[in-house]
């Protein structure tokens, strides 16, 4: 006989039966919780995937609406502000919408025209009501400064949004220049240089320094040169200004001393009357 048959132990079938029974008891005890865990894990994974797809769709929708609002070249500040509020926290959409609104407000201050107004070929608004008075221009300038500061607050300290912070600081400097606050503008441009140097963006470092250098000329009072300070170009003849004695205050010269036309008429009438009264002037007719 085969040696394997001699190794058959008595009661081996009972032991196998006991092992199978323990496995069945284990399945009866833990199969439901295990299945529940797997089911919950599957539901969580499906939920996370759904949330991610929804988040991506919201980002796509936000950028799509922002592009649609600015594609026409004449965006509405109200639309941009609504987008910034609706998509708050969605990537850089709120910051970009606010920066675009700042540009619109600055342009309105400089041109004296309502944002979004239709402009004719002569550069003037088609509607007279779209022209801004001085108080309205100042209000738009204040709103531009407020929005620029909000963007700085939202993005400052975030390395992924350093460019947005720099753009907001540049606009804050422009607002300060419009207010003739040259010290404030210089501080904004200095921060632009610092952030650009840390982010290793040399072009923006140069831009910040260029704006700081330009402030030196803006800060000084401009005076018109005197005639003695003017230098004639080659071939150009210098024109002497008339003396005070030659030109009177009201712009008339010495020729104004000539008799007026009324005086000449009066002198002619007097001469005719004298000729009629003189008897020697009468001559006989042939």
Image (cartoon, grey):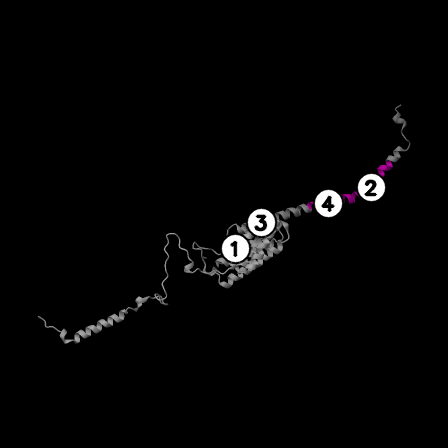
Q: Is residue 33 magenta?
A: yes
Q: Secondary structure at mark 3?
A: helix
On residue 257, the disc is none
Q: CA distance from mark 2 to mark 4?
A: 22 Å
Of residues 174 and 50, the one nearer the viewer is 174
Compare marks 1 and 2 and give the one earlier in the sequence.
2
Disc 3/disc 2 C-alpha distance (Å): 55 Å
- First along the sequence among labels 3 and 2: 2
Q: Between residues 53 and 168, which one lies in front from this camera angle?
A: 168
Mark in front: 3 vs 2: 3
What residue is shown with label 3? 63
Structural crowding at the residue carrying mark 1, measured as other residues with C-alpha within 10 Å and reported as few (<14), some (14–19) or many (≥20): few
- Look at the image and give the residue range highlighted in magenta: 17-46
Q: Which residue is mark 2?
A: 26
Residue pictured at 70% horizontal, 45% vertical? 45
Q: Are marks 2 and 4 in contact (CB under 8 Å)?
A: no
* Residue 204, x across and y down, in percent: 57, 50
Q: Earlier in the sequence, mark 1 or mark 3?
A: 3
Residue 253 drawn above or below residue 204? below
User: Which residue does the numbered mark 4 point to in the structure image?
Assistant: 41
């Amino acid at each position: 006989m085969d040696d394997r048959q001699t190794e058959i132990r008595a009661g081996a079938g009972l032991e196998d039966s006991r092992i199978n029974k323990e496995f069945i008891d284990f399945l009866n005890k833990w199969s439901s919780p295990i299945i529940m865990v797997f089911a919950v894990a599957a539901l969580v994974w499906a939920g996370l995937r759904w949330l991610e797809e929804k988040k991506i769709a919201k980002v796509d929708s936000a950028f799509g609406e922002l592009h649609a609002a600015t594609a026409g070249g004449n965006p509405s500040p109200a639309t941009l502000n609504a987008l910034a509020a609706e998509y708050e926290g969605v990537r850089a959409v709120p910051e970009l919408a606010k920066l675009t609104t700042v540009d619109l407000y600055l342009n309105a201050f400089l041109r004296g025209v309502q944002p979004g107004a239709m402009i004719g070929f002569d550069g003037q608004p088609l509607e007279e009501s779209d022209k801004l008075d001085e108080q309205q221009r100042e209000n738009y300038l204040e709103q531009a400064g407020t929005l620029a500061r909000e963007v700085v607050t939202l993005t400052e300290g975030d390395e992924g949004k350093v460019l947005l912070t720099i753009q907001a600081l540049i606009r804050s400097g422009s607002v300060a220049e419009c207010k003739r606050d040259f010290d404030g503008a210089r501080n904004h441009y200095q921060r632009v240089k610092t952030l650009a140097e840390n982010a290793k963006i040399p072009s923006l470092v140069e831009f910040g320094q260029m704006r700081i250098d330009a402030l030196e000329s803006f800060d000084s009072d401009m005076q018109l040169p005197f005639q003695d300070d003017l230098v004639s170009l080659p071939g150009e003849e210098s024109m002497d200004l008339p003396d005070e004695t030659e030109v009177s205050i009201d712009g008339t010269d010495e020729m104004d001393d000539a008799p007026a036309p009324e005086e000449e008429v009066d002198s002619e009438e007097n001469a005719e009357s004298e000729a009629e009264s003189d008897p020697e002037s009468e001559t006989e007719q042939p």
